[in-house]
Image: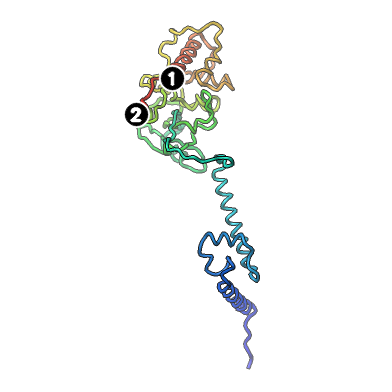
Amino acid sequence: MTTHRPAPRAEFLRKRFVALRAERATFFSAPKNQPCLGRQLSRPTRLFRCLKSAPPAGLPRFRLAVRLLLAVFGALACLALASCGDLPAPPAERTVWVPSPNYNARRPNFVILHDTTNSEAGPALRTLTDPAREVSAHYLIGRDGTLYRLVDEEKRAWHAGASYWGGNTDLNSASVGIELDNTGSEPYPDAQIVRLLDLLKNLQERYRIPAHNVLGHGDVAPGRKVDPSRHFPWQRLAEAGFGLWCHDPAGTPVPLLADPQLALQAIGYDMADPVAARAAFRRHFLALDDAAESSVAEQELMHCLALEKRRKPTPWPAP
C-alpha cells in the first residue's frame, strides 16, 4: 500500500500554521513585566511605551510589526503636517499661554466682485465646487437673482488670488468673494443687481465693511484680471452706498504738479505696473477699456477719489 505524502505546498502551510500558533502562545503568556506582551497592550499609553522599548527576544516578527507601526504613524504625521503646511505653527518655545476671554470671531473687511465669464450659472457652479480647480467664492448670483452660497463667510475662499489693495496683500483672508453670472461682455440684469445690493446691505450691517471697500477683481489684480467688465453699474452701487465714487470731479481741481500715479496709489491700486493700474481705474470709474491719453477730467477724477478715500467713514455702533 502506497503511503500518501502531502504536497510540498500543503506541508509548508501546515508547518507555518503550527509555528504561528506557537508564537501566539508565547506572546500572550509572557510575563507582565514585559510591556509589549500580554494584556498590557489594551491601553494606548502602554502601547506607545511598548513601541519605545526594545522588542522581546525570540519574536522577530513582533520587531517587524513595531517598525511597521512606527512607519505608519510617521506617515500619518507627515500627512497632517502637509495638510496645513501653508499655515505656519505659532511659536512654541519661550511661549507662555495665558488664555483671555476677550475675543470674538474675525470679520471680513472687503467685498470683491467677479464675473464668471460663463453664459449660465451651471458651469460656474461646477468649476467653483471642483476640488481639482482650486477656485471658489462665498456666493454666486445668477442672472435671475438666485443666490448660491458656496463657502461659509468665516472661511477663506479662493477667489482673489495674488492681489493687492492699499497695502493689503492677501485679499482672500480679508474679504467676501461674490461671483456674478456674466460673460464679461454683456449688461448685468436688473434682478441680479437688486439681489447683489440686498446681499451687500446684509454684509455691511453684519460686518461693518467700509463703503469704499467694495471692489472689483480687476481693481485688486490689475493686469491679471479685468472683471467686472466696463458694463458693471458701479455708479448705481455707489448711489446705494457701496463702493468708492466721486459725484463732482470738477469741484476738486487738481493741484499743480500732481502726479496721476500717486493719485492711483492713494486710491489703493498696486503701482507695480502703472499701465495696468490705470487701465483698471478707467474700467471701473469711466467704463472704458481703451488706453487713451490721460485728460484733465480724468486727473480731476483721480484726485477727487483720492480725497474721498481719505475721508473718514461714518462710524459704526460699538460691538
In which quarter of the view is residue 7 placed? bottom right
> What amino acid does circle 2 point to?
Asp
Considering every residue shown, the one lying at the far bottom of the view is: 1
Residue at figure coordinates x 47%, y 7% from the top left: 253
Task: Give the structural element (helix, strand or loop) at label 1.
Answer: loop
> What amino acid does circle 1 point to?
Leu
Q: Earlier in the sequence, mark 1 or mark 2?
A: 2
Considering every residue shown, the one lying at the far top of the view is: 256
Mark 2 Cα shell of 10 Å, populated few (<14), some (14-19), many (≥20)? few
Residue at figure coordinates x 36%, y 25% from the top left: 317
Q: Are marks 1 and 2 in contact (CB under 8 Å)?
A: no
Label drawn at residue 183: none
> Circle 2 is placed at which residue position?
198
> Circle 1 is placed at which residue position?
244
Q: In this orientation, does residue 86 appear? A: no
Residue 15 drawn at (x, y percent)? 62, 78
From this view, report whether residue 252 is shown above or below residue 100.
above
- Residue closer to the observer: 283 or 170: 170
Query: Which quarter of the figure is the N terminus placed in?
Result: bottom right
- Residue closer to the observer: 50 or 112: 50
